[in-house]
Image: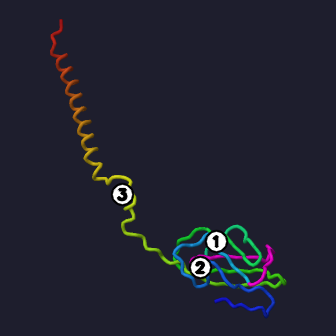
Amino acid sequence: MYPISSSFGHAELVSATPGAGSELTELPKSVTLVFDEEVLNASESLAVVVLDPNQQELTFGEPRVDSTEVTRSLVSSNIPGNYQVNYRVVSKDGHVVTGEFMFTLLAVAVPSNSNSADNTESPPVNQLEPESTSWNLWMLFGLVAGLALVGLAIFRYKKQPIN
């Protein structure tokens, strides 16, 4: 997948996570590149950039170098399609090494009944309706009875003869 050769005397990419040509269902939190020899932590010449299918950069923070490994953090994305990784490192002997590769984020099918987990935690709406309807009927009955009593009191008050 990646050429491994020491004849040039500078670092070459031997593996990556995610790997070139890999198909993923979820974007990882970082990309890690592994070289066949130590790379320098020369910030002005060190770059790892990941672009989504819309050519928007997903990398943030500075690349971290640990001997032969370079890691860069990624922001979250769920856009299906091809993601491009571009890199530039400086090998131990001072040579600048550049390259790129692609990996694919697959579209993940969403279950048609995505609320099924929610239904186990709370009762369906149709089970709440009879209780709320019953409550509403009692409220209406109380209001009508109260108005009837007020009306009866007013009627009786007006019917009393004035002395």
* Residue 150: quadrant of the picture: top left
Q: Which mark is residue 42?
A: none
Sequence-wise first label, 1 or 3: 1
Sequence-wise first label, 2 or 1: 1
Identify the amino acid type marked 1.
Ser
Which residue in the protein does label 1 denote? 30
Q: Residue at x 23, y 28 (%)?
A: 146
* Residue 112: quadrant of the picture: bottom left
The one of 146 and 5 positioned closer to us in this rendering = 5
The one of 59 and 37 positioned closer to us in this rendering = 37
Say which element carries label 2.
Answer: strand
**On screen, 63 above or below 88?**
above
Identify the amino acid type marked 2.
Tyr
Question: What stretch of residues is rendered in magenta?
Answer: 36-54
Magenta stretch containing residue 98, yes or no? no
Identify the amino acid type marked 3.
Asn
**Mostly what secondary structure, the magenta segment?**
loop
Which residue in the protein does label 2 denote? 83
Which residue in the protein does label 3 denote? 119
**On screen, 163 above or below 14?**
above
The one of 80 and 93 positioned closer to us in this rendering = 93
Say which element carries label 1.
Answer: strand
Spatial distance from mark 3 to mark 2, Cα to Cα? 37 Å
Quadrant including the N terminus? bottom right
**On screen, 97 above or below 145?**
below
